[in-house]
Image: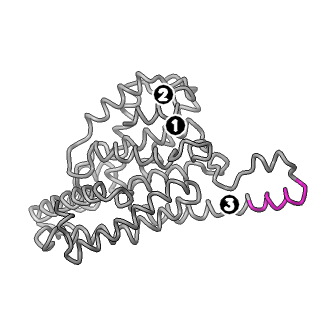
Amino acid sequence: TTLAAMEHLGLFEKVPLIKKENVAKFLKALEKQYASPEYHSAVHAADVVQAVLFILAPTGLESDLVHRIDPNAVFALLIAASAHDVGHPGLNNAFLCNTEDPRAARWNDVSVNENGHLHVCLALLKMHEVFDGLPENLRKQCKATIGRLILSTDMAHHTRLVEEFVDVAANAIEAANVGDEWDERGGGGSLANHNRDDGSCVSNWQDPTLALCFVLHCADISNPARPWSTAREWGRRVTEEFHKQGDCERARGVPVAALNDRNASGDVDKTTAANQAAFLEYVVEPTLSGLATIAPNAVEVMMKHLCENRYEYQRVVTGSFEEYKN
């Protein structure tokens, strides 16, 4: 999936110093390092890569976001998307910290899973010489970008990431509007109007990586913004992974989080639907609203699916769920 996405975007032509055969070897080795929990698997990684690709290039036109991001950054984004959950044990950071897991000790109880994913990713990139053809400064920049991207997928950073992105995007739009007013008064000329930046040209931002982090985060939480059959299946998978963590919590004698307690779920279909509907309403929809400032065409499609899925989840919760079960 990742290699196909890179080829679709023409990245090997735009970044010729990165060899396709090395990337292919890296991706093959990366897939083998993924564990097989119900949700955080290699399939989820492929799904997130596909979502990133859709956000970057939903129409194939020059107006797509991908044309407003440096190709090296796009490459780093797709690498991070493919590796962002590698080795995930199906247990969240809180569980690993609360049970004093060796992985938590290794990373000082800070973004335990995400630091582990990054460690594996960087080791495999080095092993397969993915960045060896790049100048040293660009190699360091790509690695730093990938590091920031993967660490930003920790849901503990959700609120701060959304606030920072919305603030920076609003400032970029405001600055672009000021420039338009100056052009209209005759200061910019026709060339400036022809090449005008409405604030969505991420490569012109003071911190372009922030936008990349936001794109990856949106892709990572986008399950409820998929067609109903896909959204439904991911909802089932994440619920079962939560329940298996709850089983581990019970076995270890630690408090079982309400979301993880399969014994308290009652009708699992209704509970899953209610949880997914709440996630859609309070997390996914507001986040995608922010993304619309730089990727309006993609968000329009995703919001359509959100609206349809909100209705379907309500049907399940209220009892009209035969279609859900089938």
Segment tinted magenta in the rendering: 177-187
Q: How many marks?
A: 3
Residue at 49% of width from left, 49% of height from top?
Answer: 55
Q: Picture coordinates of residue 250 (x, y %)?
A: 11, 65
Question: Image quarter for residue 13?
Answer: top right
Question: Image quarter for residue 111?
Answer: bottom left
Disc 2 is placed on an element classified as loop
Q: CA distance from mark 1 to mark 2?
A: 8 Å
- Mark 2 vs mark 3: which is more N-terminal? 2
Direction bottom: furthest residue: 318
Characterize the magenta stretch by its predominant secondary structure. Answer: helix
Q: Which residue is mark 1?
A: 142
Q: Which residue is mark 3?
A: 173
Q: Picture coordinates of residue 200 (x, y %)?
A: 63, 53
Q: Please state which of residues 258 and 144 is positioned toward the viewer in this rendering.
A: 258
Decide: few, some or many residues near mark 1? Use Cα within 10 Å; few <14, some 14-19, many ≥20.
many
Q: Which residue is mark 2?
A: 131
Q: Picture coordinates of residue 146 (x, y %)?
A: 46, 42
Q: Is 130 drawn above or below residue 238 in the view shown?
A: above
Q: Nearer the viewer, mark 2 or mark 3?
A: 3
Residue at 12% of width from left, 62% of height from top?
Answer: 247
Horizontal placement of 299 versus 258: left or right?
A: right
Determine contact: label 2, label 3, CB under 8 Å. Answer: no
Determine contact: label 1, label 2, CB under 8 Å. Answer: yes
Q: Please state which of residues 310 and 261 is positioned toward the viewer in this rendering.
A: 310
The quarter of the picture where the N terminus appears is top left
Disc 1 is placed on an element classified as helix
- Which label is found at residue 127? none
Q: CA distance from mark 1 to mark 3?
A: 27 Å
Which amino acid lies under the numbered mark 1 shown in the image of this protein? Cys
Residue at 22% of width from left, 43% of height from top?
Answer: 35
The quarter of the picture where the C terminus appears is bottom left
